[in-house]
Image (cartoon, rainbow, N blue to C red):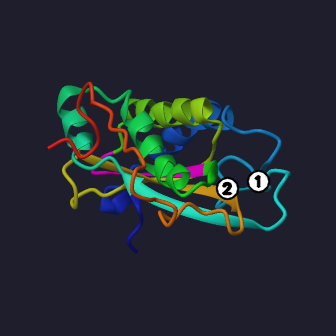
Amino acid sequence: MTTYRTTGVNLDAADAVVSSIEQAVTATWGDNVVGSFGGFAAGVTLPQGYTKPVLMMSTDGVGTKAELARQTDNLDGLGWDLVAMCIDDLVAVGARPIAMTDYIATGRIDVGRIERIVGSVAAACTHAGVALIGGETAEHPGVMDPDVFDIAGAALGVLESGSAIDGSAIAPGHIVIGLVSPNLRSNGF
């Protein structure tokens, strides 16, 4: 019989990751989170003040910046980039971000590295007022090199029905504002 362990998946490391990230993740939770840490799913109740709420979702990753971060061991900003990539897409359509999940795929679980990445995601979620309600760390031995990883996320937002920003209000004479990037952003090379 084939088991996770015989395929190279380190269940002890997986359990260690879950234990090491619990405090950072649950620190993003408020009274609106439904479920428990480590369960198969969690949810959030909708904020007050919506008559006809519409749920909006976005998913994204940090692209090639994950590889740059791996090569330089500069992991602490990845979560901030991931949260920005996901919730900025919600904000762009007028939705209020309320929850997020993350996904990390790696060739071999390095507990310290995963803890740093998820800690960064949790810090960014806390700053944005978004609950990090779940995630997945997937170990792919033999498919990915042991030290390689990729990270992605999905965010949930809410807006009032009929209030989505869709670009239809753009008219000649409106001003476009561009901001200079002070450093490397997601999808870095």
Tell me if residue 31 is in the magenta stretch. no
Tag count: 2
Q: Is mark 1 in CB contact (under 8 Å) with mark 2? A: yes
Residue drawn 37% across and 39% down?
A: 177
Please give left or right for residue 134 compared with residue 89 in the image: right
Look at label 1 and name its amino acid: Gly
Residue drawn 37% across and 29% down?
A: 77
Tell me if residue 105 is in the magenta stretch. yes
Which residue was labeled with disc 2?
39
Please tell me the numbered disc located at residue 126. Answer: none
Residue drawn 33% across and 30% down?
A: 75
The x, y position of residue 112, in whole percent, is 40, 29
Classed neighbour count for the residue bearing mark 2: other residues with Cα under 10 Å, few (<14), some (14–19), many (≥20): few
Look at label 2 and name its amino acid: Gly
CA gap, disc 1 to disc 2? 7 Å
Please give left or right for residue 182 compared with residue 9 in the image: left
The span shown in magenta is 100-108
Which residue was labeled with disc 1?
35
Query: For the residue labelled by badge 2, is the local secondary structure a helix, a strand or a loop?
Result: loop
Please give left or right for residue 51 compared with residue 44 in the image: right
